Image (cartoon, helix red, strand yellow):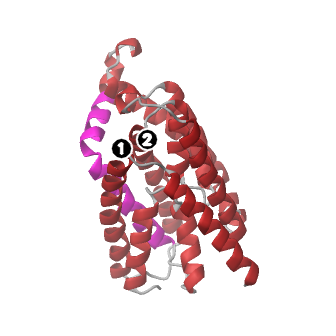
Amino acid sequence: MIPVLQAAFLGVLQGLTEFIPVSSSGHLVLFPKLFGWPDPGLAFDVAVHVGTLLAVVVYFRREWWAVIKGFFTSFRTRPSAWDRWQRLSWLLILATIPAAVVGVALSGYLEDHLRSVPDIAFFLLLGSLAMVAAEMLGRGVRGLPEVRLRDSASMGLVQIAALAPGMSRSGITMSAGMVSGLGREAAARFSFMMAAPVIAGAGLVEAVKLVKDPPGGTAAGVLAAGLVTSAVVGFFTVKYLLSYLRRGSLLPFALYGFCLSFFILVLWAVS
C-alpha cells in the first residue's frame, strides 16, 4: 500500500499528464520506478481514471449536455439536416470506436510487452515528432463547430497508438486534428471530449478486473487522495492548456518529450 502523500503526487501527475501532451501512462509507469515506490495497485488506477473523467466531464458540462441531447434528437432528423451538436455526437462516437476495439483486443498484450523503459522512451520520442510535424504541416483555423468526418476519423485512428505507454493520447490526437485542418484549440477541445469515453472505458475495464480479483485492501484515504487530486488538477489543466493553445504551440511539449526520452535512455543505459 502506498502512503497518502505518494497517492496525492501520483494523482497530480495523472491530472497534469492526461491532458498535457506528454503521456500520462508513461509518467505513471516511470515515476514509481524512478523513486522505487511500490505499484499503487489496480484500485488506485481506477480512482485516478475516475478523477480525470470527472475533470473533463465537469469542464465540458455544457458541451456534453448539448451533445447528449443532440445524440437523441438526431434519430428524429435526417443526417443532412443535423445541427452541429447532433453531428458532433456521432463524430465523437466514430472517433472512439477504433481505440475501443483495439484496446479490448490487445489490452493484455500491451500490458505485458510494451511497458519497458526503452519502449516508453521510444513512444515519447515518436509522439514528440508527431507534434513537430503538426506544427509544420498544420495551418488549420477551423473551430469545434466545424469538425468534419475526416477530422474525427484521423483523430480516432491515431488514438490507437496512444494505447502504448509513452505515447501521449492528447498529443497524437491533437496533432492529427491540426494536420487535418483544425486550429490548435479546436483540435484540443475535440481531443479532450474524445478522452471522456476512452477514460471511462479504461476505468471500466480495470474496475471489472478489480471485481474479479479483489486486492488485499487499499486504504480509503489513498484512493480519495488520488481521485481528488487528479480531478482538481485535471480540471485546471484543461482550462489553462486551452487558454495557452489559443496563441501557443505544441513545440514546448515536443521539446520536453525529446529531453525526457533522452534522459530515460541515459538512466536505463547506466543502471
Query: Where residue 267 sits: x, y (%)?
Result: 68, 79
Q: In this view of the protein, which residue sits in the foreground, 24 or 242?
A: 242
Where does the magenta region start and end? 42-70
Which mark is on residue 246? 1
Taking the magenta stretch, the answer to whether it contains residue 33 is: no
24 over 179 or under it: above or below? below
Q: For the residue carrying disc 2, how many other residues have a C-alpha within 10 Å: few (<14), some (14-19), or many (20+)? A: many
Question: Which residue is located at x 37 percent, y 66 percent?
Answer: 230
Query: Where residue 122 sits: x, y (%)?
Result: 69, 60
Q: Which residue is mark 2?
A: 184
Q: How many marks?
A: 2
Report whether 165 appears left or right of 214.
right
Quarter holding residue 108: bottom right
210 over 246 or under it: above or below? below
Q: Earlier in the sequence, mark 2 or mark 1?
A: 2
Could you tell me what secondary structure mostly forms the magenta stretch?
A: helix
Question: Which residue is located at x 30 percent, y 53 percent?
Answer: 239
Taking the magenta stretch, the answer to whether it contains residue 48 is: yes
Q: In this view of the protein, which residue sits in the foreground, 64 or 30?
A: 30
Does residue 182 show up?
yes
Q: For the residue carrying disc 1, how many other residues have a C-alpha within 10 Å: few (<14), some (14-19), or many (20+)? A: few
Does residue 98 show up?
no
> The residue under label 1 is which amino acid type?
Arg
- The local secondary structure at tag 2 comes to helix
Q: In this view of the protein, which residue sits in the foreground, 194 or 271?
A: 271
